[in-house]
Image (tube, rainbow, N blue to C red):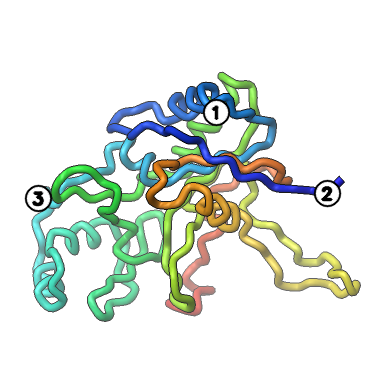
Amino acid sequence: MNEEIKIIGIPNFPLIKNGDDLASIIKNKILEEKISLDQDDIIVITQRICSIAEDRIKNLNSYIPNTFAKNWAEKYNKDSRLIEAVIQESKKVIRKKNGILITETKHGFICANSGIDNSNVAGIDNICLLPLDPDSSCRIIKEKIKNEMNKDIAVIMTDTFGRPWRMGQTNIAIGISGINPIQDYVGKKDIFNRTMNFTMICIADEIASAAELMMGKTKKMPVAIIKGYKYEKNLDTISRIVRDEKNDLFR
């Protein structure tokens, strides 16, 4: 029997509001759309709906720009309030070039503008910040599905990041629950019986990117289910796949 992996988007997903019980909404939509949820499926969710439900939508008028924000905004024709928000959501600025700020977020992610975005966000001058604890958000959904549907699944939260060495953006994992995010081949034999010494595949990012093919940015389908992928279960956090500074060739 040939192995296969399926990506199933959950259609007709409602617009999420602050305070919504995201886990219950996902569960109810699975039942309403008569989607079969099986043991070991992977539920993939976008960062945006988690941020909205967790009150991470902020208005730019709540930020008072400091001197750097004002100067940078004036130089590159940016909104100084947005620059201030980027600074406040970061541990530090990694790169500054051509009006772009590459920062390290408080989670440890290296990305443009601390992951702040205003696409698919309702309201004038509103911006979307990353969830405070993406792993915790995933864990809550995983536990509710297990308790109420008796399905032991994994959950991955995604966001769209750019890459310094390639054009175009791709979805990556910024939160996980119930899955080892790394497939480690170190010490194993390749097809020619040679020992592999370095290969570690970030399957969490690969799953996130695969799910984005179904979810898209304009389909109003922020949740997808991955079926048929065999993964190792554990209690890892997203920090497992964040490269530390001493081993980061770009810092």
Give the percent coordinates (x, y) of residue 57.
Answer: 25, 43
Of pointers 2 and 3, the one earlier in the residue sequence:
2
Residue 231, can we see it? Answer: no
Q: Are marks 1 and 2 in contact (CB under 8 Å)?
A: no
Which amino acid, mark 3?
Asn
Residue at label 1? 143
Q: In which quarter of the image is residue 169?
A: bottom left
| Residue drawn at point x = 51 percent, y = 36 percent | 10
Q: How crowded is mark 1: few (under 14 residues within 10 Å), some or many (20 or more)?
A: many
In which image quadrant can residue 193 be found? bottom right
Q: Which residue is drawn at 41% across and 46% down?
A: 219
Q: What residue type is labelled 1?
A: Glu
Q: How crowded is mark 3: few (under 14 residues within 10 Å), some or many (20 or more)?
A: few
Image position of 57 (left or right of 33):
left
Mark 1 and mark 3 in contact? Answer it, CB < 8 Å: no
Query: Sequence order check: which comes first, mark 1 or mark 3?
Result: 3
Residue that numbered label 2 is attached to = 2
Gap between marks 2 and 3 measured at Cα: 56 Å
Q: Residue at x 48, y 47 (%)?
A: 215
When the figure is inspected, residue 215 is found, relative to residue 103, above or below; the finding is above
**Which one is nearer the viewer's eye here, 246 or 44?**
44
Question: Label 2: few (<14), some or many (≥20) within 10 Å?
Answer: few
